[in-house]
Image (cartoon, rainbow, N blue to C red):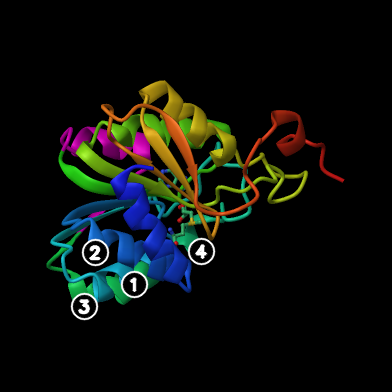
């Protein structure tokens, strides 16, 4: 196993929560410049800004508005999103000198971020097939070599939100993306994934949690009941 993955395994074994696990990964990797795609009420950002003292700059990317093509339960009206935005700002205000806010979709935000400028990106926005494709493709190039591309909702049940909403395709798409980039991907607890921008290592899937081995598309795609 890669040395980096062995180090992450030790962290994962002790982590009690999703936020705590990422905080430890961020600290151990000495992440200074991080972006989060899909910030919502700012809980993840506030946790990392509060407990990861090494973070020097945190870019928050979220349109905080209703989106015509996002068929997910969180896609509420603009009035609702004004409150969500206000909460995200309020809970990260203590770190406003480290915070940049890009109130845009990933596609709108991408031209504003320099290539290879970030140590880590955390993807937690639009998890439909369209959304995760755009997020991984546009944000991977923003990472410096060796950077981390993490994300949420690596769920095996693509019908996470039921038959009335679009399926969630973070799993298995993130694995295919890692294979296409020829880099390692780590499957983590708390339904998280982590792609390492390490092209010299080649593609490999590391399972640090159980249940994702031998994933078959016909199983994850089982029709909703
Ligand atoms: C699940 S919430 C994020 C939760 C947050 N990361 C946390 O852990 O507290 C999803 C967010 O993604 C945002 N979003 C949806 N489509 C997006 C897109 N195309 N680009 C960027 N953000 C998007 C939504 O506005 C929403 O705030």
Labels 3 and 1: the sequence-earlier one: 1
Count neighbours of disc 4 (C-alpha within 10 A) and say few if under 14, some if 14 to 19, many if 20 or more: some
Mark whose residue sits in front, 2 or 3: 2
Q: Is residue 83 visible?
A: no
Residue 94 is inside the magenta segment:
no
Judging from the image, what secondary structure is the residue with disc 1 in? helix
Tell me which residue sits at (41%, 28%) in the image. 203
Labels 4 and 3: the sequence-earlier one: 4
Labels 2 and 4: the sequence-earlier one: 2
Between the C-alphas of marks 3 and 1, the distance is 11 Å
Q: Measured along the vertical axis of the image, is residue 106 above or below residue 133? A: below
Judging from the image, what secondary structure is the residue with disc 4 in? helix
Count neighbours of disc 3 (C-alpha within 10 A) and say few if under 14, some if 14 to 19, many if 20 or more: few
Between the C-alphas of marks 4 and 3, the distance is 23 Å
Q: Nearer the viewer, residue 4 or 71?
A: 4
Could you say which disc has been placed on residue 27 in the image? 2
Classify the position of the N terminus by image quarter. Answer: top left
Give the extent of the magenta segment.
100-116
Which residue in the structure is indicated by mark 1?
Answer: 47
Between the C-alphas of marks 1 and 2, the distance is 13 Å
């Amino acid at each position: 196993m890669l040395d980096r993955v062995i180090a992450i395994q030790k962290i994962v074994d002790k982590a009690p929560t999703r936020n705590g696990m990422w905080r430890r990964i961020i600290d151990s990797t000495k992440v200074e410049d991080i972006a989060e795609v899909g910030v919502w009420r700012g809980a993840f950002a506030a946790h990392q800004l509060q407990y990861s003292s090494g973070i020097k700059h945190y870019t928050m990317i979220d349109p905080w508005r209703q989106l015509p093509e996002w068929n997910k339960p969180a896609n509420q009206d603009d009035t609702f999103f004004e409150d969500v935005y206000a909460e995200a700002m309020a809970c990260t205000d203590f770190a406003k000198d480290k915070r940049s806010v890009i109130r845009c979709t990933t596609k709108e935000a991408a031209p504003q971020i320099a290539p290879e400028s970030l140590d880590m990106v955390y993807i937690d926005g639009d998890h439909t097939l369209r959304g995760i494709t755009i997020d991984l493709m546009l944000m991977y190039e923003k990472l410096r070599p060796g950077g981390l591309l993490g994300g949420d909702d690596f769920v095996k049940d693509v019908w996470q939100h039921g038959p009335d909403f679009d399926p969630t395709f973070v799993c298995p798409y993130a694995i295919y993306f890692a294979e296409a980039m020829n880099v390692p991907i780590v499957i983590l607890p708390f339904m998280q994934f982590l792609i390492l921008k390490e092209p010299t290592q080649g593609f490999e899937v590391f399972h640090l949690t159980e249940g994702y081995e031998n994933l078959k598309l016909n199983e994850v795609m089982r029709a909703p009941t």
